[in-house]
Amino acid sequence: MLLLDGLKELRRHSEFGETQLGKVAGSDGASYLMMSNGLYGYLPVWPFSRDKTGEERVVHAIGPDGVVLWHAFLDITANGRMKTTPQGNLLVFYKYGELSMLSPSGGNLGTADTGMETDFEPAFLHENVLVTAGFSQSGQIQAFDLELGKMWEYQLEGAVANSPVVAVDNSIRFCSASGYLHCLAPDGKLRWRIELGTGSFRDMALAVDGTCIVPLDNSLFAVSPEGELAWHRDIGDGQLASPAVDKDGNIYTAGPDSGIICLTGEGNELWKLGPDDESGDWQLALIRPGELFLTQGSRAILVKD
């Protein structure tokens, strides 16, 4: 491993020889990577078993020790979105609204049709109920029971701008391209909305107390559970990564001009690393207490307290 200024470069998965389309972590420490497989001759084994060859989608299941556990070849309509269920199964989403469920060992547990293409990261409202969002000129938020089907749908006048998140009180937050942060009740009724401004939204994070941390261009907004603006902070130039919040309420994000930055729950800077000269969007996630995993361009790094 390369150790430099507290940053550890982790194993890359370029040995697969494929383009990464999506990734998600499981509760058991496993990671799932969806790749675009440019090798010809593979037949998608499941869930659709279509008789075609060419560029397909492959899911690699990787254990916490970096060992590849299994591979699954999918149809090309898989759109890169995945989600692990509370039971440890893996949901894979496809164009045109289809989804399939895979067991932790890679077995096919069945398919369903949500009726709406999922373009953002889904969230769980209840143990078996997903909240999904579709991107279009007329955006939609939907609650979908994996056994019973669609429960309700919330229609926007404009497009959805980022992935929905679910708070501890089961309220649902998401942003619209018109510049508003919306909050829905568990039954899909609007509780409140607050205008933040138009621009490029990234996915949000929720603090333990229900405060919503919203990245808009190079700014972070903190909005209380009641829909009031707590604070707003501009951070360097360029698009910020989707933030992460730890159990103490500290906020982590990164940007091309700011590098990696940690803020208190009140928006004050605790520490900063970088920036450096490597280009590429930042993506980050808290993987264990005190450990922050980030990717930028071709790099994967781990920051420890």
Image (cartoon, helix red, strand yellow):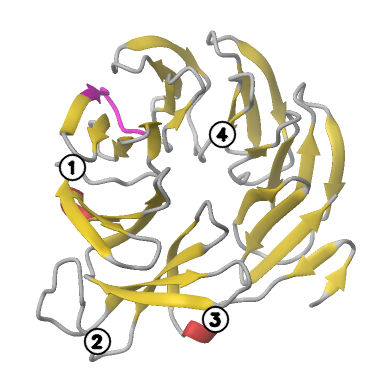
Tell me the kind of residue under disc 4. Answer: Leu
Q: Which residue is mark 3?
A: 14
Q: Between label 1 and label 4, give the one nearer the viewer.
A: 1
Q: Secondary structure at mark 2?
A: loop
Q: Earlier in the sequence, mark 2 or mark 3?
A: 3
Q: Quadrant of the N terminus?
A: bottom right
Residue at screen point 63% across, 40% down: 243
Q: Quadrant of residue 129?
A: top left
Q: Quadrant of residue 303?
A: bottom right
Q: Earlier in the sequence, mark 1 or mark 4?
A: 1
Q: Which residue is mark 2?
A: 42
Tell me the kind of residue under disc 3. Answer: Ser
In front: 26, or 188?
A: 26
Q: Which residue is mark 1?
A: 114
Q: Secondary structure at mark 4?
A: strand
Q: Which residues are magenta?
A: 153-160
Per the picture, the main secondary structure of the magenta-coloured stretch is loop
Q: How far, Cα to Cα, is label 1 from label 2? A: 27 Å
Question: At which x and y percent is residue 148?
Answer: 16, 34
The answer to whether the residues at label 1 and label 4 have Cβ atoms under 8 Å apart is no
Q: Which mark is residue 216?
A: 4
The answer to whether the residues at label 1 and label 3 have Cβ atoms under 8 Å apart is no
